[in-house]
Image (tube, coloured by chain):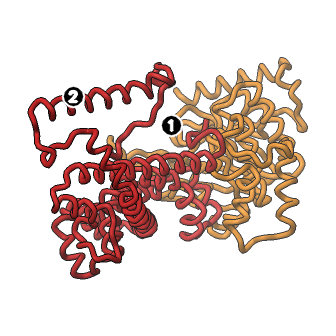
Chain colours: A red, B orange
């Protein structure tokens, strides 16, 4: 969902149109094969609906899907924002002391490797069944790339720049605020690019666990309800909505990231030419 | 009293081949207002000596005095120009030059804006380029900005570590003239690391030829100041160039 390559047609040496048309052709062929298989083998719609049925379900359910997508988008954005803020703060802490880094890094790895599905019930007990828990799960899943990228940005500073600051007798804080933090902005953007897809996944995983309670009702709840009622076509429509949501967030962050980086060093990108 | 006094400096590094002596009981005096070049092949310790004088590298033995004071007390009198311009890529030229002021916020003396303008004009920056980012500048312009940044705190001593090594010959000689002008105007002391003989002869009052962590020979340069670009094409310059080159070869034997 998150690794959709941007259309870099001119770089690939193929024209603008084929790079748009080719994926559409693939989509059409897959849909056609899918349709033929369902019809030919008389697969019941509850197991595998026809592609047309999924599109129809998307259209008829559009208001519910739009509403639920909006809820999930908010949770994902809050989750991503929380990871950016908390992750950067942890990275700053890590950059200040090798002892802190050594002592705490294993727990960051733990955060990355712990099966979120296993601790989600615990989070519900602690934090309830509302937006907060969904944002929490989204944040836990998406925070690692921020911590690791920003930490590495804060630590891998050009030796000449460090010497320049030392020559001026710069304090630890001046070096942090005027050198380390600005130097690691590109790393934060890189971390956000990886994390934005994870934030959507996290929000949906959170929603699947948080039972629908009226107050909060995102795509995960919609999927739960459709699955319970064996409305397969509508379930698949909801899955498609999740995918679109992920792509939307990914493309927005890519765009915003490139914009920020271009502004950061003006026009020439981050690599100084 | 000398601007820079180095006494019995000894620096050892621990590398793959065990202990390596980079500076070997080296002593050097730089008189106030003089330009002294450190000339020698790669690995002879010239950059290390400069870093020791700047307080950026520790020495195991020996002392460095700046204007008769210890390094800790005299840090504000020094400025360093790096081999790469080392400008912060997210700051404009103006903001890069202002950086030392921001770091030493305690020492804000006089009109900062006027000082920055003065330094940028001194190194030949047009006002239209003041607010460009380093990525929009040529190599020569970056180095000019770097020199302006070094001058902004009005240091008495400039330490330069092969600042023009990456530039072409024409740009190099133009920036050499710029340095001479700056030093002539302000009576600054300069310790200049280079491996370019012509540059060393043109700029310096004397040339310290380094070899294997020691000063092999201190050669006074006989040409009077102010020097102009025409000096480079005189037979005297060529003949002295030959002498320095010979001394350099001798030191390696």
Give me the chain letter of mark 2: A
Q: Residue at x 76, y 37 (%)?
A: B220
Q: Which disc number belongs to residue B176?
A: none
Q: Is residue A175 left or right of residue A111?
A: right
Q: Residue at x 35, y 66 (%)?
A: A139
Looking at the rendered structure, the secondary structure element under dot 1 is loop
Residue carrying label 1:
B43
Residue A185 vs B42, above or below: the answer is below
Choose between A83 and B167: the one closer to the eye: A83
Choose between B112 and B30: the one closer to the eye: B112
Looking at the rendered structure, the secondary structure element under dot 2 is helix
Residue carrying label 2:
A33
Choose between A31 and A162: the one closer to the eye: A31
Q: Position of residue B155 (x, y in %)?
A: 76, 58
Mark 2 vs mark 1, foreground winner is 2
Q: Position of residue A34 (x, y in %)?
A: 20, 33
Q: Is residue A146 left or right of residue B102?
A: left
Q: Position of residue A53 (x, y in %)?
A: 26, 43
Q: Is residue B85 visible?
A: yes
Q: Is residue A146 visible?
A: no
């Amino acid at each position: 969902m998150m690794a959709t390559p941007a259309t870099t047609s001119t770089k690939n040496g193929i024209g603008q149109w084929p790079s748009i048309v080719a994926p559409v052709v693939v989509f059409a062929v897959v849909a056609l094969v899918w349709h033929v298989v369902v019809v030919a083998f008389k697969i019941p719609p509850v197991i595998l609906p026809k592609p047309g049925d999924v599109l129809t379900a998307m259209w008829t359910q559009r208001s519910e899907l739009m509403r639920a997508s909006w809820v999930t988008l908010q949770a994902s954005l809050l989750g991503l924002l929380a990871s950016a803020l908390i992750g950067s703060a942890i990275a700053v802490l890590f950059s200040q002391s090798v002892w802190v880094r050594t002592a705490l890094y294993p727990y960051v790895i733990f955060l990355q490797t712990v099966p979120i599905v296993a601790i989600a019930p615990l989070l519900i007990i602690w934090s309830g069944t509302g937006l907060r828990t969904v944002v929490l799960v989204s944040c836990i899943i998406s925070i690692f790339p921020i911590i690791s990228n920003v930490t590495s940005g804060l630590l891998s500073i050009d030796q000449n720049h460090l010497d320049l600051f030392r020559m001026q007798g710069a304090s630890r804080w001046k070096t942090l605020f005027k050198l380390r933090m600005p130097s690691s902005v590109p790393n934060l953007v890189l971390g956000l690019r990886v994390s934005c897809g994870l934030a959507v996944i996290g929000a949906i995983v959170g929603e699947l666990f948080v039972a629908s309670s009226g107050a909060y009702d995102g795509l995960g709840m919609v999927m739960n309800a459709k699955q319970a009622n064996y409305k397969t076509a509508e379930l698949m429509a909801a899955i498609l909505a999740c995918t679109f949501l992920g792509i939307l967030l990914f493309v927005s962050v890519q765009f915003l990231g490139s914009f920020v980086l271009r502004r950061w060093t003006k026009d020439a990108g981050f690599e100084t030419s | 009293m000398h601007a820079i006094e180095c006494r019995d400096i000894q620096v050892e590094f621990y590398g793959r081949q065990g202990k390596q002596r980079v500076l070997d009981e080296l002593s050097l005096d730089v008189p106030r207002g003089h330009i002294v070049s450190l000339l020698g092949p790669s690995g002879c310790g010239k950059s290390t000596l400069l870093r020791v004088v700047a307080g950026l590298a520790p020495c195991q033995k020996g002392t460095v005095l700046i204007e008769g004071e210890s390094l800790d007390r005299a840090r504000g009198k020094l400025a360093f120009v790096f081999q790469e311009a080392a400008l912060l890529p997210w700051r404009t030229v103006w903001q890069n030059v202002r950086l030392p002021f921001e770091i030493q916020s305690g020492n804000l003396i006089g009109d900062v804006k006027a000082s920055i303008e003065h330094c940028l004009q001194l190194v030949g920056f047009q006002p239209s380029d003041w607010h460009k980012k380093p990525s929009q500048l040529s190599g020569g312009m970056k180095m000019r900005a770097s020199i302006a940044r070094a001058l902004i705190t009005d240091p008495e001593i400039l330490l330069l570590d092969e600042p023009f090594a990456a530039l072409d010959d024409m740009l190099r000689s133009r920036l050499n003239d710029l340095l001479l002008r700056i030093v002539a105007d302000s009576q600054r002391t300069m310790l200049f690391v280079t491996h370019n003989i012509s540059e060393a002869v043109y700029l310096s009052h004397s040339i310290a030829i380094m070899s294997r962590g020691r000063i092999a020979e201190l050669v006074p340069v006989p040409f009077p100041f102010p020097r102009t670009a025409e000096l480079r094409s005189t037979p005297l310059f060529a003949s002295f160039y030959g002498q320095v080159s010979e001394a350099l070869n001798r030191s390696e034997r």
